[in-house]
Image (cartoon, rainbow, N blue to C red):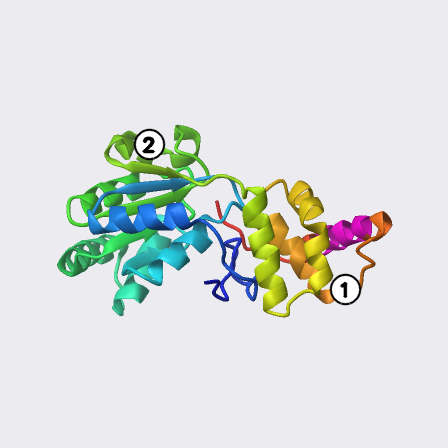
């Protein structure tokens, strides 16, 4: 059943009211890995829906999440917030020690979303976390170029790769948006065009559907479809980028 969640994984943008659909296999696998307390690296290109998938899974199982994980200080701030602790006034080493103890006490799975080219300090912290609790990492790939120094730990992680939407998932997304009254029913007629135009990217599909929801287009006119895509690109250019790695 669709929920009103950002299907493309970019908080704060115009996609927030659009439905989450598909990814049943990935949701099921992540839930299974959670129950077996396994370390996970979730990877796929920008806009593929990693963050949205993690939020969906978090609706069913407890996850302690850091939505942006480029720096150790950012990770500490998000985890402290999730634990309801206040350590920001302490020096970073003291905060790290406190977090390792607190997280280990909860046994919660820790999720580091938006990881990119991790440095030695974040890698050290993750290695200590892995000794205490399951750790999930979300990045653009499982390659050293994206994981940085964390790549040295990757042999201990289960790999879950997100692929582009298939045509059936694009159709399910558009149909859900229609059922929610976000776009006109005529949008179902251009599902094939939406799939080709988005190339299976949930982010681009979200942007196209969001543009369609706010404009008036003759969906039987190819020129109107060109204008729809142009409007999407203009909206994208004018909106502040929220997307992480």
**Above or below — where is 128 with respect to 206?**
above
Report if residue 43 is visible in the image.
Answer: yes
Tell me the CA gap for discs 1 and 2: 45 Å
Percent of width and height locating residue 32: 26, 48
Please state the extent of the stretch shown in magenta in the rendering: 225-235
Percent of width and height locating residue 161: 41, 38
**Above or below — where is 121 with respect to 21?**
above
Percent of width and height locating residue 90: 25, 62
User: Which of the 4 quarters of the picture holds residue 41?
Assistant: top left
Q: How crowded is mark 1: few (under 14 residues within 10 Å), some or many (20 or more)?
A: few
Q: Disc 1 on helix, strand or loop?
A: loop
In front: 94, or 174?
174
Q: Disc 2 on helix, strand or loop?
A: helix
Magenta span contains residue 230: yes
Disc 1 vs disc 2: Cβ atoms closer than 8 Å?
Answer: no
Percent of width and height locating residue 220: 82, 53
Figure disc tally: 2
User: Does 130 sit left or right of 78 as displayed?
Assistant: left
The residue located at (29%, 37%) in the rendering is 158
From the image, tell me which residue sits under label 1: 215
From the image, tell me which residue sits under label 2: 151
């Amino acid at each position: 059943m669709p929920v009103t969640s950002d299907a493309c994984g970019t908080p704060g943008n115009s996609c927030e009211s659009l439905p989450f659909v598909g990814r049943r296999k990935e949701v099921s696998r992540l839930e299974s890995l959670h129950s077996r307390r396994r370390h996970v690296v979730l990877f796929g290109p920008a806009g593929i829906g990693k963050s949205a998938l993690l939020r969906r899974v978090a609706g069913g199982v407890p996850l302690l999440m850091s939505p942006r994980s480029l720096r150790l200080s950012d990770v500490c701030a998000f985890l402290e917030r999730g634990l309801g602790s206040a350590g920001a006034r302490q020096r970073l080493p003291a905060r790290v020690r406190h977090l390792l103890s607190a997280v280990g006490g909860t046994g919660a799975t820790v999720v580091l979303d938006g990881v990119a080219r991790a440095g030695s300090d974040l890698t050290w912290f993750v290695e200590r976390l892995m000794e205490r609790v399951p750790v999930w990492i979300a990045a653009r790939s499982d390659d050293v170029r994206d994981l940085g120094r964390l790549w040295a730990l990757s042999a201990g992680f289960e790999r879950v790769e997100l692929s582009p939407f298939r045509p059936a998932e694009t159709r399910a997304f558009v149909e859900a948006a229609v059922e929610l009254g976000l776009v006109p029913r005529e949008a179902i007629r251009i599902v094939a065009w939406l799939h080709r135009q988005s190339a299976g990217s949930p982010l681009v599909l979200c942007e196209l559907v969001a543009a369609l929801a706010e404009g008036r287009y003759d969906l039987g006119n190819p020129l109107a479809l060109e204008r729809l895509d142009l409007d999407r690109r203009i909206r994208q250019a004018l909106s502040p980028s929220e997307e992480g790695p």
